[in-house]
Amino acid sequence: MDALVVKDLYKAYGNDVAVGGVSFDVKDGEIFGLIGPNGAGKTTTLRVISTLLTVTSGELTVYGKSVTEEPNEVRKIISYLPEDAGAYKNLTGRQYLEFIAGFFTSGSTKKEMVDRGVGIANLGERIDSKVDTYSKGMMRRLLIARAIMTQPKLAILDEVTSGLDVINATEIRGIIKDLSKEGTSVLLSSHNMFEVEYLCDRVALIDKGKIVADGAPDELKKEYSANNIEEVFIKVVRG
Amino acid sequence: MISHLWHLIKKEVRELLTPATVIPIVIMAIIFASIGNLTGGAVEDTLSASPVIGIINLDGDNETYSAIIYDTAIAMNASIVFESDDINDLQEGLDVVRERGAMALIVIGPDYNESISSGEKGNLTVYWNMKGTGIFSSMSSAPVDIMLSEVSRSTTYALIEESSDLDPENITSPIVYSSTTLLGDKELVGLGPETVAGFLQSQSFTMPMLIMIIIVMLGGIIISSMGQEKENKTLETLLTLPVNRTVIVSGKLLGSAIVGLVFAGIYMVGMNIYMDNLMIGDVDLSEFGISMGTAETALVGLMVVLAIVCALGICMILGAFAMNYKAAQSLTIPITFLALIPFFVTMFTDYQSLSPILQALMFAIPFTHPMMATNNIMVGNMELVYYGIAYLAIFALATVFITVRLYKSDILLTGVGTTVKGSRTRRRMRK
């Protein structure tokens, strides 16, 4: 079964059309990248899939469950990490993970889930420090841990390494690769074309609210006679 | 569902109840209590103090009426720091009064006894030693004021006794009347309207003050919290978790209510100490049936709870439009006004004295009803209390309903009239 199927998704705010008829699918266990310029509709698409925004028209299913008809069921199997997200400042990293885990499980399995999160975050003793004292890299690690520890079937990650230094970004890419190997499907958006090429099994290029090209990175490079996805992107966007 | 709710409440309380939020409230309460203690103590100390005076007696012999002055001073344990019978000693007397910190220098005029004996007024000149310019500075002269009033009364009695066999008490107060005040359906035997009004005013201050503080506190807390949640995008995370939106709204409402009540409780302790120290001669009217039983107290409690839910509902609706912490601050203004208007109106006037339009506006504000509840119950105006509860319940349900709807809509994340990332692109697309 496909992890995600998006059919002709339209999302409008009054007369403003944010996403104008987007269709794509994410296979089970696949890392799928959504790339595009600022304002192309990536974040809106991810928010709609994550049940945060309503759908103007179109059909969306996550592992066969309708985003519009069964949002609560969808929320049980997805995990969404917004761009530049933070955590509750007065909680420690561990308390934050416990808070999130409390919505998925309880008792000893909750402890297992939190321990898994603590391991992914790999913050050492700082896991018991207030979130308020974390650097951007530490915060991102904590949030990745939060998103992954619940073992979602589909992880939706928006600009996951945005603003991070090379070391933190590399570590997080490694975590995402491992996640996919463990069977979680991943839908991510990014500006970083090299990151997308490195991580993704398939990508879709979105511009002005529409998918303008999609396929495996190697196929796209071949199709557009480009050396990398960045060149593909420029050729597609500039026509 | 209950465990999710409890989980959210705990998080909300933990997030909002921090040293950074509690310490300013505690300091404020301590300042209030300290001001009450200081001013109350100062008033009591001053009123119970003995007069400290100097006396220059220019009337020669210590005759009947000037003797009353000395007798009264002795009876009041007055301390006489300077005494003379020569007007040339006036400057010396004033210097001594200043140096010794006495309250006043009293100069008994040369014809004091003769004037009073012949039916004219006796002449005293009083030099007051003012020790400060604060509100309570004039209080320091109160013991001498009291002493001079007593001298005046004793002189009157002495004059009456000299010329009549009648009891001076009956001459100065020839009539006696007993008061019965009609308040609603109650007859308050032995009480005048001033006493009753004084008691009711003290009651009508406490409840509106409590409600006003709770609402203003909650307004700030919940709107700021929502602004922060949006800024940190923790709200986005929360809304993608497998938990019902109604539970999220309820968790926020209840968590904020608990924190608001804790803050209001701390404030009220300070405020009560402040008020207790300033209220002198308070009257308890419970023996006249002007009090609240368990059922009435429960009604007021219900109204306070409903008012809190209304306040939280309004705040969450306003907070939904705050896109960040900074924007949230300005959104606390409407809720503050909604709390202050009925507070001042109930403090300084009665709703019946307002025009019908203003009455309608007052009653439309949900917080008016609990602020008026205590006095309405005491005077037996139960119809207004029951209407108030019904209105609050409807208002609370409506605000919670709207809040849940907002949490299910895009407005919470996108705001009204705002466009999300890429509006320029979308405009291009329309072209």
Image (cartoon, grey):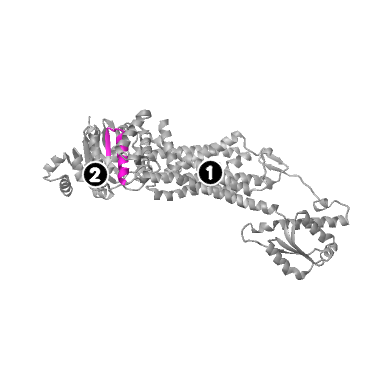
Residue B164: x, y in percent? Answer: 88, 54
Same chain, labels 2 and 1: no
Q: What subunit carries mark 1?
A: B
Does residue A145 appear left or right of residue B285 in this picture?
Answer: left
Q: Is residue B265 visible?
A: yes
Residue A173: x, y in percent? Answer: 23, 41
Q: Secondary structure at mark 1?
A: helix
Residue B181: x, y in percent? Answer: 70, 43
Can you say whether B218 is above or below A69 in the image? below
Does residue B398 appear left or right of residue A140 in this picture?
Answer: right
Q: Secondary structure at mark 2?
A: strand
Q: CA distance from mark 2 to mark 1?
A: 49 Å
Which quarter of the figure is the N terminus of chain B placed in?
Answer: top left
The amino acid type, in three-letter code, at marker 1 is: Ile
- Bin the neighbour count of mark 2 within 10 Å (Cα to Cα): few under 14, some 14-19, many 20 and up: many
Disc 1: which residue: B266
Principal secondary structure, stretch drawn in magenta: helix
- Marker disc for residue A190: 2
Q: Is residue A8 visible?
A: no
> Residue visible at 41% across and 36% down?
B8
> Residue visible at 73% across and 55% down?
B146
Does residue B199 appear left or right of residue B409 in this picture?
Answer: right
Front-lying residue, A58 or B228: B228
In the image, the segment drawn in magenta is A136-156
Q: Is residue A154 magenta?
A: yes
- Bin the neighbour count of mark 1 within 10 Å (Cα to Cα): few under 14, some 14-19, many 20 and up: some
Q: Quadrant of residue B385?
A: top right
Q: Is residue A200 magenta?
A: no
Front-lying residue, B255 or A14: B255
